[in-house]
Amino acid sequence: MALVALLRAQPQNTTWRELTEQVRESGSALHVWEHYFHTRLTPDGDHERMLSDAATDLRSWAASGLRFVSVLDALFPRRLLDVVETPPFLITQGQVDPVDEGVSVIGSRAASERGRAIAAMIATHLVETGLTVISGLSSGIDTAAHTAALAAGGRTVAFIGTGSLNFFPPENRDLQRRIASEGAVLSQFWPQASFSKTSFPMRNAVMSGYGLATIVVEASEHSGARIQARKAVEHGRPVVLTDRVVAATSWARSLARCPGVWVASGLRDVSDIIADLRRQPKAIEQALYALAQDR
């Protein structure tokens, strides 16, 4: 309740990132709330209403089948605590796993038939090796990856760029509901929020932080996948680019020269790379993160 009220009020023009850091450092959103509003010493009707409104929001979201998982909650994904873009909360539907082992499979919305087929093959392979398939529920590559993971009987997690009560794109409404039932749908935005110019890049940064690695199957020069790939490098998360992406885009050719970025020419390459990364994931992440900070 205090965390929702804090994020609504943003006292002294604090940003969500600053409030998140303060809450994590304090270990209590209520303590941070009291720091700004001194409710124990000087009760204020407006402040009490803000807390009451937050409680009403939480009850309403719960009644809609949504769970509010704060950054201090034991269910909050552990890997997200390692990145600078740690969100203050996640709105969740489905089964949340704080130590989920998954890999992002992402790419162009306007994907080719071949690109969608490659995404499906990669997603199926990840499921067969016991990994969760993470993607963004967009058209094209994301849809192919989610659908293949479900068809293979595996777990898939969707990070969406809107609030959980919205469906974007609209044609993925049924897929979103199925993932919420059989996997998990996660959002870092208020449940009623619509998409914006910044929401999808924010989503990509958090999706990178959640997973063990990011695989970019097919993308254009200005694809959102480019944003996630670059963020993954900053986070010290491995990135796998297909040779199709490297051949088609200048950003991928540039990124391929960075430590922790691999180029794969087929499913066997992807399989070998992911297998190597799983053997020592934390050591690799730490080494890549140190290299990223030195660049």
Image (cartoon, helix red, strand yellow):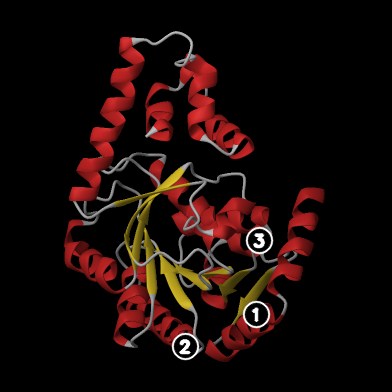
- Going by the numbered disc 3, the residue's amino acid type is Leu
Q: How many marks?
A: 3
Residue at which label 2 appears: 125
Q: Residues within 10 Å of mark 3 (few under 14, many from 20)?
A: some
Helix, strand or loop status at disc 2: helix
Residue at which label 1 appears: 278
**Residue appearing at x 53%, y 56% in the figure:** 228
Q: Nearer the viewer, mark 1 or mark 3?
A: 1
- Which of 87/169 is in front? 87
Residue 165 x/y as whole percent: 22, 49
Give whichever of discs 2 and 3 has the lower sequence position.
2
Q: CA distance from mark 1 to mark 3?
A: 22 Å
Q: Give the vertical position of 120 relative to 288 (above or below).
A: below
Q: Quadrant of residue 284?
A: bottom right
Residue 200 visible at all: yes
The circle on residue 203 is: none
Quarter of the image that includes the N terminus: top left
Asked if disc 1 and disc 3 are in contact, CB closer than 8 Å, the reply is no
Q: Is residue 28 left or right of residue 139?
A: right
Q: Is residue 165 left or right of residue 4?
A: left
- Which of 123/63 is in front? 63
Asked if disc 2 and disc 3 are in contact, CB closer than 8 Å, the reply is no
Helix, strand or loop status at disc 1: helix
- Which of 282/40 is in front? 40
Residue at which label 3 appears: 255
Q: Give the vertical position of 82 relative to 258 (above or below).
A: above
Residue 223 visible at all: no
Q: Quadrant of residue 57?
A: top left
Q: CA distance from mark 1 to mark 2?
A: 14 Å
- Going by the numbered disc 2, the residue's amino acid type is His
